[in-house]
Amino acid sequence: MLDDYKIYRCWYDFLNWTLKKVDTFPKSVRYTVSGRIVNLSLDILEEVIYCVYKKSRQVKMESINLKLDILRTFWRIALDNKWISVRNYEYICEQLNTFGKMTGGWLKSETSGQSLS
C-alpha cells in the first residue's frame, strides 16, 4: 500500500541516499549534525506513513513542512563546513523542493476536501 504513494517512494529513496551520505561526515559531528539530519529524515518518513493511514493529516503535513525547512538548514551547515559537495547540495535542494511541493499539494487537497487517497 505504501508504495502506491509517490510521496512515500520519493522520501524513502532520499532517506536511503541520506543515510549513506551522512556516514561520510567527520566522526566529530556524527552525534550532532549528521544525527539530527538522520533523525529528522526518519521523523518525516514516519509522518508520511501516518498520513497514508490516517484521515486527519493536516497537522502532520504541516509538521513535515516545518521539518523540511529545518533539514534544509542542517544540509546548508554541511555544505558550509564542506562535508558535502556543491553538487550534492544541489541534489539535496532539488529533492527537498520536490518533496515540499508534493507535501504542499497533498495539504492543499486536504484543506479543500479532496483527499488524494
Image (cartoon, helix red, strand yellow):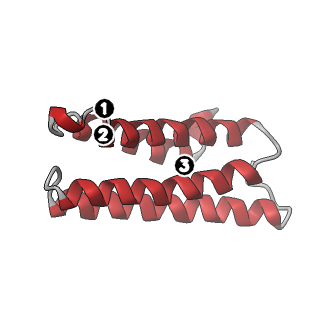
- Foreground residue among 83 and 45: 83
Return the residue at label 2: 34
**Which quarter of the figure has residue 96?**
bottom left
CB-based contact (under 8 Å), mark 2 and mark 1? yes
Location of residue 12 in the rendering, given as x and y in whole percent from the top left corner: 45, 39
Q: Tag 3: residue type? A: Lys
- Foreground residue among 24 and 26: 26
Left or right, 57 with reference to 48: right
Q: Which quadrant would the N terminus be assigned to in this image?
A: top right
Left or right, 47 with reference to 59: left
Return the residue at label 1: 31
Q: Which of the two discs, 3 and 1, labels the residue nearer the N terminus?
A: 3
- From what the image shows, is residue 98 above or below residue 18? below
CB-based contact (under 8 Å), mark 2 and mark 3? no
Q: State the residue at coordinates (54%, 43%).
A: 44
Location of residue 106 in the rendering, given as x and y in whole percent from the top left corner: 68, 59
Q: Residues within 10 Å of mark 2 (few under 14, many from 20)?
A: many
The answer to whether residue 115 is visible is yes
Location of residue 114 in the rendering, given as x and y in whole percent from the top left corner: 82, 61
Return the residue at label 3: 6
Q: Tag 1: residue type? A: Tyr
**Which quarter of the figure has residue 109?**
bottom right
The Cα atoms of the two marked residues, 3 and 1, are separated by: 31 Å
The answer to whether residue 17 is visible is no
Q: Residues within 10 Å of mark 3 (few under 14, many from 20)?
A: few
- Foreground residue among 113 and 38: 38
Q: Secondary structure at mark 2?
A: helix
